């Protein structure tokens, strides 16, 4: 049994490394700081002859690499595709944009800006944590914040646009009655909460890095889970909004699946496919940044 | 350093244990079979004085236990609540059920059966993998299959009901034009795929248990991810369907938020809350059945 190697994660390190650190190196090259338990025997570690990774999920075989590239590429195409389709729909079939003077055209800003903010920018922002596997965590974190910060004005202006277009219509359209609007309210609330919590916990609290490490580490999985949830909820809200708008504007002619109906359904399917691919990319264990440190030891048994 | 303890997962064991085995016991009591790497030193393991679990996510402190009970109870309330609300809506406001002689009343079977199948039964079926933490995996697996098998007739009859009600209407309503119907098609396809793959992979392939262990273990995370996704997609499809039906039946009066509109919006919010709580319960690392085996060793350093 001279080639037995045991993978040894160092759990107290892992959550911090997940977000804050550069990719971990084996402790032979750069010993982990702090009061982490040392390898069972330093002698054993030094004698390690062969490195084998038993954790298949984390090994980057050729197949895994191509799967990763494929789903990330697909996710990017779908995130941009949704924005292109909604722009095409609004510009080609709904008369483009306006502000204030024409409430119908002002409304058109709503679907475009909400998809830009909640789907495209937020989607890219989340993808960064999979694409930026080899980058320093702090850069990934900064770009994650920047992309989400770009989403904020889109969401705010998109929200004002729909309120304005309702209030300026003749007769005015009531606000916040439909289940779409209630869902939008929940989605915006979750988004705002995530943004504020994320900003303060993962950026501001870095000023006292060591004291807040445990707290920040415990927040990571909650922030990530609610991030994916907010994205899914945003997709569902978009789909109810598209249903509303389509029935209000196309009416019974929707059932004849004219050009515009096909474009709207294609946009809906792009959003659904985007949700599927994003969830797969974000939840797939093997695609995650893994804070595991592999220790190569040789058993004396 | 006489109390250093290193948690040592045995990764080749873990994925099988996730689905197939009774909760693992420390190797001192029942050594794991096969060619797993032994603990670094049996002597060290025997000398272990203190057992400490560094993997905080898996430790069941009092707080975790109450959090677990709370979210599971909430999930159960929301899954049943959605079914109760849709039944109340259909019976009290939409005139109840019929078959064939009245297409409008036949349609009413559609939302009730789809929510029963895709939300309540499927939701319970997935929750079993969190509730049944202490049970033998094979029983959990069987009940998971039974609950999903109960969902199948609901979905099938719910699907026939909407096709029938469209075809029997005067004039007939066209099928498969709306984005709701396209989403329903994708959801039913994913559900069927998951059911067939799950049934063959995790039950039929058990007949040659050892030969298929690796294949089954590699399928587990994919099956779980697509299961959650199918549930989320089902919720989104329900919400677009509710939007459609509400606008078609209530029209402009929807904006005055009468009794029926409130019930429909409450149903929608129950579905949204159900999706949030289910995703949290299913994705929360600490609630998962963990196949880790803790080895207690005492370092000589």
Image (cartoon, coloured by chain):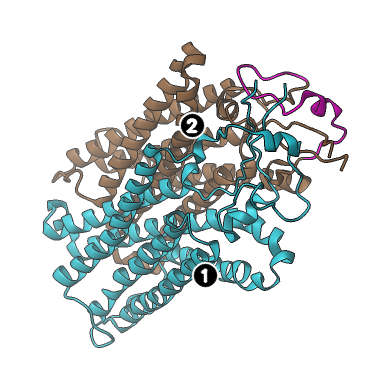
Chain colours: A brown, B cyan
* Residue B179 seen anywhere in this rendered image of the structure: no
Circle 2 is placed at which residue position? A220
Quadrant position of residue B8: top right
Circle 1 is placed at which residue position? B192
- Which residue ends up furthest to the top in the rendered image? A207
Please provide percent x and percent y for residue B261.
17, 57
* Residue A148 seen anywhere in this rendered image of the structure: yes
Chain bearing tag 1 is B
Vertical placement of residue A205 versus B242, above or below = above
**Disc 1/disc 2 C-alpha distance (Å):** 34 Å
Per the rendered image, the range of residues in magenta is: A29-52
Determine whether, in the image, residue A215 is placed left or right of residue B12.
left
* Badge 2 density bin: few <14, some 14–19, many ≥20, Cα 10 Å: some
Q: Quadrant of the C terminus of chain A?
A: top right
Q: Residue at x 60, y 57 (%)?
A: B220
Counting labels gives 2
Chain bearing tag 2 is A
Vertical placement of residue B56 versus B215, above or below = above
Please provide percent x and percent y for residue A111.
37, 43
């Amino acid at each position: 049994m001279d080639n037995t190697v045991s993978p040894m994660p160092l759990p107290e390190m892992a959550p911090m490394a997940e977000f804050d650190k550069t990719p971990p190196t084996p402790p032979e090259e750069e010993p982990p700081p702090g009061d982490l338990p040392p390898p069972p025997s330093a002698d054993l570690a030094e004698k390690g002859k062969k490195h084998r990774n038993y954790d298949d999920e984390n090994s980057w075989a050729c197949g895994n690499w191509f799967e990763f590239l494929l789903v990330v590429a697909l996710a990017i195409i779908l995130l941009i595709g949704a924005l292109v389709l909604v722009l095409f729909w609004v510009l080609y079939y709904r008369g483009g944009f306006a502000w204030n003077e024409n409430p119908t055209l002002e409304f058109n800003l709503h679907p475009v800006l909400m998809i830009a903010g909640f789907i495209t920018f937020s989607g890219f922002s989340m993808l960064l944590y999979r694409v930026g596997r080899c980058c320093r965590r702090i850069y990934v974190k900064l770009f994650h914040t920047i992309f989400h910060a770009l989403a904020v004005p889109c969401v705010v202006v998109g929200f004002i646009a729909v309120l304005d277009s309702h209030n300026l219509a003749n007769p005015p359209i009531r606000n916040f009655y439909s289940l779409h609007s209630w869902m939008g309210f929940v989605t915006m609330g979750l988004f705002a909460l995530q943004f504020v919590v994320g900003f303060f916990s993962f950026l501001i609290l870095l000023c006292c890095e060591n004291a807040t490490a445990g707290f920040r580490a415990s927040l990571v999985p909650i922030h990530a889970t609610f991030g994916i949830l907010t994205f899914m909820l945003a997709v569902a809200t978009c789909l109810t909004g598209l249903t509303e708008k389509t029935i209000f504007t196309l009416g019974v002619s929707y059932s004849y699946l004219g050009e515009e109906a096909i474009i709207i359904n294609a946009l809906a399917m792009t959003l659904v496919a985007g949700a599927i691919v994003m969830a797969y990319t974000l939840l797939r264990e093997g695609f995650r940044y893994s804070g595991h440190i592999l220790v190569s030891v040789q058993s004396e048994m």
